[in-house]
Image (cartoon, rainbow, N blue to C red):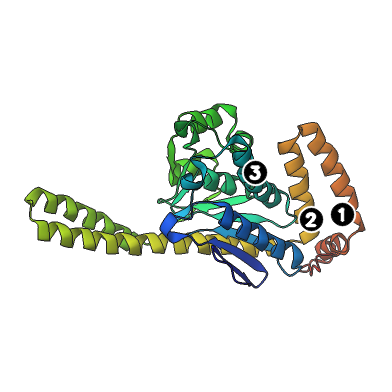
Amino acid sequence: MDFENIIYTVEDGIATIKLNRPKALNALNSAINQDIMAAIDLVKADSSVRVLIMTGSERAFAAGADVKEMAEATPRYAREFCGLAIDINNILESLPIPTIAAVGGFAFGGGCEMTLACDFRVGGSRTTLSFPEVGLGIIPGANGCARATAIVGPAKAKQLVMLTEMIPGKQAYDLGLLNWFAVGDADLDAAAKAAKAAVKAAKASGNEEEIAAAKAALKSAEGAAAKAEYDAIMAKAIDVAKKLMGKPACALASAKAAINKAAIETIAAGKAQETTEFTLLFDTHDQKEGMAAMIEKRPAVFTNN
């Protein structure tokens, strides 16, 4: 199925939804949200899909909601617009399969909220997470405040949301907003750094031709380095996806359900859900196979049933 604003692919049990509004840095408007929802429906209907990867490009995962669409919105329209984004994020959070956000470049506002709705997040040195909404006179509208609180705690969540800070990749990893920090190509990174220094030197010279040539070289060098880092981010996301696919699907779904229950509701509710899920798994083929394989000292052959 072809989409106007995303690219949807499935390969070896891994579905990928790639946001594809490059001129708008993948800003989230009604059209792209509708495409994302339609692609998620395809994921839900395809039993061969074991993991879903959400991603954008090397420049931007998603640069927030499209301000042009929201600037003159009425409260009613804003609620309807955010309603679809809330639905998308809730589904990403509750899908029985694992979801991974491969975050290259910017993930601002609604884009950041979408990454936090995924089970896992991979980024790099060019990844930047931010909630800029308070600076626009609003707050995150698709449950970003709640999910940030669940992931980093209320004090850090207030810092992220109320100060509208831009959080670079390494800091995001240290805070727990990223699960993995991917490294690109060191030589290309060095070339981009050198090209940046060359632009500074050219500007000091005042020679317009030198400045133009240096800027063109910087654009090329930075583009190559950013692509290498994005490729590393995607490679890590796929590596994680393949590891998850080696685990029994029923157990993964149960673990996700129990952890989400504790995070979204209460620890007590999570404990009750965990007991229920644990008990039900003893009625599955994969529980019998997994324990038999351990006793017999052989690799387990799971059927995801």
Tag 3: Cα neighbours inside 10 Å, few (<14), some, or many (≥20)? few
Q: Horizontal placement of 208 versus 161: left or right?
A: left
- What residue is disc 2 on? 251
Give percent across and percent down for residue 146. 63, 35
Q: Residues at badges 1 and 2 in contact (C-beta under 8 Å)?
A: yes
Name the kind of residue labelled 3 in the image. Glu
Where the C terminus falls, by quadrant?
bottom right
Which circle's residue, 1 or 2, is located before the other in the chain?
Answer: 2
Tag 2: Cα neighbours inside 10 Å, few (<14), some, or many (≥20)? many
Q: Horizontal placement of 62 versus 35: left or right?
A: left
Residue at figure coordinates x 64%, y 66% from the top left: 15
Of the residues tagged 2 and 3, which is closer to the observer?
3
Tag 1: Cα neighbours inside 10 Å, few (<14), some, or many (≥20)? some
Count of numbered marks: 3
Q: Quadrant of residue 44?
A: bottom right
The answer to whether residue 10 of the structure is visible from this angle is yes
Element at badge 3? helix
**Farthest-out residue, top:** 155
Residue at figure coordinates x 56%, y 48% from the top left: 179
- What residue is disc 1 on? 281
Name the kind of residue labelled 1 in the image. Leu
Question: Where residue 80 is drawn, which disc sits there?
Answer: 3
Give percent across and percent down for residue 73. 54, 40
Name the kind of residue labelled 2 in the image. Ala
